[in-house]
Image (spheres, rainbow, N blue to C red):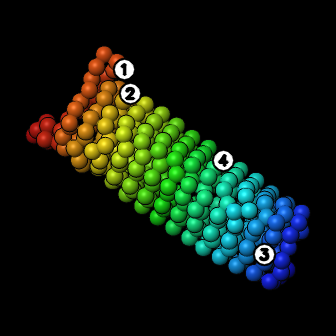
Amino acid sequence: MELIKNKEFGGERPLFASHGLKLEGVTIHAGESALKECSNIEATGCRFEGKYPFWHVDGFVVRDCLFTEGARAALWYSRGLEMTDTRVEAPKMFREMDGLRLRGVQIPNALETLWRCRNVEMENVEVARADYLLMYSENIRIRNYRHQGNYAFQYCRNLEIRNAVIDARDAFWETEGVTVYDSELTGEFLGWHSRGLRLVNCKISGTQPLCYARDLVLDHCTLAPDCDLAFEYSTVQATIDSPVTSVKNPRSGRIVAQSYGEIILDDNIKAPADCAILTREEQDGQAR
């Protein structure tokens, strides 16, 4: 690989169509498309200030780098990225990408980030201001993750999350095939219109969670007192290790909880209207 060390570039396309480059301590100043149409790129300890530095790139490694706010929309239409120990301060990152591995990455301004991406792995990643993160993305594995920002994971397919703290209104809307393990989920209107959402050993808070869901599973989760009007028009199998403030008009399935503040079954319930709603004591009694 050709080594470029401790140099500065700016303007339009300074390293356009380069292949087999190793960048160390390089600064990309204001300009556009510094590394567009490239392949086999390694960047270590670099600073990116200009717009769109990595577009249409095939195979690249980014270590210990900084993308300033000016490096907007830095990584689009590319594949085969491994990014570690990097800080990304610019919004609208990672679009239409295939094959991303992010480890030890901080994204404090993650607005509209990771859209329409495929085959994503994230570990020890923190995001903030992350409205609409990972929209329309698929085949995603996330571990040891912290998230602040609304409308997260909308329209995702085949997503697994472990050991996360997620603060997001309207998270997991219209998702399919999502499983979340051992996590804290905070925010209103969680998981509406989802299909096959499975929550395992999760702590859930926020009003009106998990409505209009199909094939919803809760496996030994807890619901905070503000989780009222839960499961409206959902088909659900739930084991809840806490009291539930209120359940409203679930369509079908079985819900078992420690206790219920209120169960609302009114004329607006939808067929088949046969959800079994039991306390743990009632379930144990049936088993005898």
Please state which amino acid type lies under the numbered disc 1: Lys
Q: Viewed as shown, does residue 71 lie left or right of 180?
A: right
Q: What element carries label 3?
A: strand
Q: What element carries label 2?
A: loop
Q: Distance between the residues labelled 1 and 3?
A: 60 Å
Query: What number is the disc on residue 116?
Result: 4
Check if mark 1's residue and mark 2's residue have beta carbons within 8 Å.
yes
Query: What number is the disc on residue 200?
Result: none
Q: Earlier in the sequence, mark 2 or mark 3?
A: 3
Q: Nearer the viewer, mark 2 or mark 3?
A: 3
Q: Distance between the residues labelled 4 and 1?
A: 34 Å
The residue indicated by pointer 2 is 233
Q: Distance between the residues labelled 2 and 4?
A: 29 Å
Q: Viewed as shown, does residue 192 lie left or right of 236?
A: right
Classify the position of the N terminus by image quarter: bottom right
Other residues around mark 2 within 10 Å, as few (<14) / some (14–19) / many (≥20): many
Please state which amino acid type lies under the numbered disc 4: Arg
Q: Distance between the residues labelled 2 and 3?
A: 54 Å
Q: Which of marks 3 and 4 is in front?
A: 3
Residue 192 against residue 272 in the figure, above or below: below
Q: Distance between the residues labelled 1 and 2?
A: 7 Å
Other residues around mark 3 within 10 Å, as few (<14) / some (14–19) / many (≥20): many
The residue indicated by pointer 3 is 27
The residue indicated by pointer 1 is 270
Please state which amino acid type lies under the numbered disc 2: Tyr
Please state which amino acid type lies under the numbered disc 3: Thr
The structure residue drawn at horizontal position 50% and vertical position 55%, both measured from the top left corner, is 148
Check if mark 2's residue and mark 4's residue have beta carbons within 8 Å.
no
